[in-house]
Amino acid sequence: MIYSVIVDVSASEVDRIFDYKGEGYKVGARVLVNFANRNTEGYIVGEKETSDYDESKLKQIIRPLDDFCAISEDLLKLSDFMRKEYHLRWVDVLRLFIPAEMRGNRVRSLYRQQVRLAVQDSLDVILDGLKPNATAQRDLVTYLYLNGASLAETVNAEFGNSALRALKQKGIVETQDIVVRRTPYKGIQLNAPVKHKLLEAQQKAVDAALADRTGKFLLHGVTGSGKTEVYMTVIERIVAEGKTCIMLVPEISLTPAALKQLRERFGDRVALLHSGLSVGERYDEWLRLKNGEAQIAVGARSAVFAPLTNIGAIIVDEEHDSSYISDFNPRYNTIDVAAFRAEQNGALLLLGSATPSLGSYYAAKHGKLKLIEMPERINKQPLPKVEIVDMSLETRRGNKGIFSALLKQRLAETLEAGNQAMLFLNRRGYSSFLMCTKCGYVAECKNCSATLTVHRDDKLLKCHYCGAAYYLLDVCPNCHSASFRQGRVGTQQVVDLLRAMYPDVKVLRMDADTTQTKESHGKILQAFADGEAQILVGTQMIAKGHDFPKVTLVGILDGDQSLHNEDYVATERTFQLITQVAGRSGRDKDKGTVVLQTYTPKHYCLQYAARQDYVGFYNYEINIRQSACFPPFSEIVRILYVGEKKQDCIDELTEQYAALTEIKANNPNILFMDKMRCRMERIENKFRYQILFKLSAEGTDDVIRQIYAVCDAKKRRDVSVSVERNPQNLS
């Protein structure tokens, strides 16, 4: 038999099929082959009887790498789709389908020795055969008789190795190696499952989704409308039919809550997949899904590749979130991948959000998605009242702090009532920059075109792009002055200010600095849910998906932060973020309040967000998009040039720009094209330049193919050239 193999080498020169001989292998298996005179891992993607090459010169597959077929037929078909849709190398796609540590045999199943009784006699009979003074042996036998098989390490710690060894020699006990599953979040607090009676709106949403088991739906429900229970009920019905499900959440910080809810309802049938797990945990969870031990996969973006078959539903919560789009190689849109897998399996696709992306809502309005609406909260409470504070007026009144007078008042009232508050600021660290007031020197990263952020807790200056850290400056390296001014306030400073204002109040902080370990997200959220703190300060990690009944106040400290970015989606993202974080307030019996601090209080985005009027915002913003011909009425394409040598990047861009100019001259579908350096010109010691296109919404496939062809013909090996369609970040 001839097998088509993709070698595990990420290089365009070898991004093609190679033929090898062998017998008894399955398509989708990982194998070891000899390639370019060295043993290399590879993936079998096809088989055939004959080869187009001289079969006498074909090499034999050396051996399989696993005792199972790693990649299913469904996923191989998905790889074809992704290669063509996103112009990806075959091996880069195939690597997405397995835990990274499987490559190079860096992870394997964990075996532990188990001890059990080797005889079937009664306890009295077994003990009669042991000396009365063999206390440890008699205790060990009694333990195993009452508790059954146990791990050897547990037995040895309790009764000693000599007792176990003696009983083995007598044939009374025996040992065997068993596989031990490494389970993430084993300590998560599970409550007894509660069978919820669906409210009328929830029942209508479930009925609508399940009425078309192959349909694509957009569930638009306001914050607190009970979307999660709709997801759970859909999963319950699908799994009861013997099918499997995938549920995606946008961020790792949301996975503990989602996992808890699913485990309470479905127990061990749930497996978790995301990049924050340990190597062993990710492998074991992946293997449970692969072997059919688990039927429900939950996780962030990468869980869309869960090795499940017979998929009945794929649910994407917070579908508007930009984290569903991978902006590094391999680049892909998770929702597109989910839609392909759903169609491939004849499965239901359910996208949910309180603030859907404009593209999704536009698609729903034009019949490409079926729209399900849940416009009211389940507790019948109104959406929280949003009070806008003009911070420029606060400044004129002499208040130069980050807390407005109104926010201080509302915070005091909340704490006095015994309730909780969440304060949102999407900027971590202590302050955003450090500047010398004498000469104007600003501390910048040596590797990136970025100012360094002050992290007072660590006494460091940190770069939030490459992660580099520097000692906090005592004197200016330029003029040797010790006079510094710090930039905009970050979450660290907010916590310090709150602790000074309320020394007896416990404050928690949740941002990238406090959630660097796998368990940290869950621990912070659980502590806040248990009432161990009255105030939670955080970045966008706290903005969506969390349900804290005691939270009656949300403070948005800098509502303008993302509003004025040089990006056509800036207003959309700002509206979504403010609406989502505002929705954390008043989710139980007590009414909620939101204080929105801004320097542009009359901006239409903030006005609509204050009213939490998604439809109004959509109608206003979609008209602007149509007038300016931005997506969904066009497609934005970016070609990104990255390299360590600035001139090489410029030269490669210049040559390709000339070729692309000829294409533009003959193609009316190219509405705009220009070249420029990126706003962040240098990241991690690599320079970055770009060409931007605006293409008409229809008839772009041919243009895209021509763009790919020009980019593939790059001449400089040290310059990376990549194409992004509708990029989420143009910085």
Image (cartoon, helix red, strand yellow):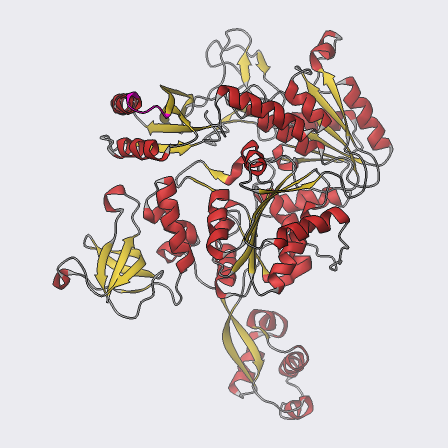
In the drawing, does residue 153 fall left or right of residue 467?
A: right
Looking at the picture, tell me which residue is in the foreground, 389 or 692. Answer: 692
The residue range painted magenta reads 665-669
Q: Residue at x 45, y 23 (%)?
A: 445
Is residue 674 located in the magenta-colored stretch of the structure? no
Res 173 seen here: yes
Q: Work out whether 320 lies above or below 427.
A: below
Q: Residue furthest front?
A: 367
Q: Position of residue 37 (x, y in %)?
A: 18, 54
The answer to which quarter of the image holds residue 644 is: top left
Q: Position of residue 284 (x, y in %)?
A: 50, 60
Q: Position of residue 108 (x, y in %)?
A: 43, 61
Q: Residue at x 34, y 33 (%)?
A: 704
Which quadrant holds the N terminus? Answer: bottom left
Res 429 seen here: no
In the drawing, does residue 19 fall left or right of residue 359?
A: left
Q: Residue furthest right?
A: 417
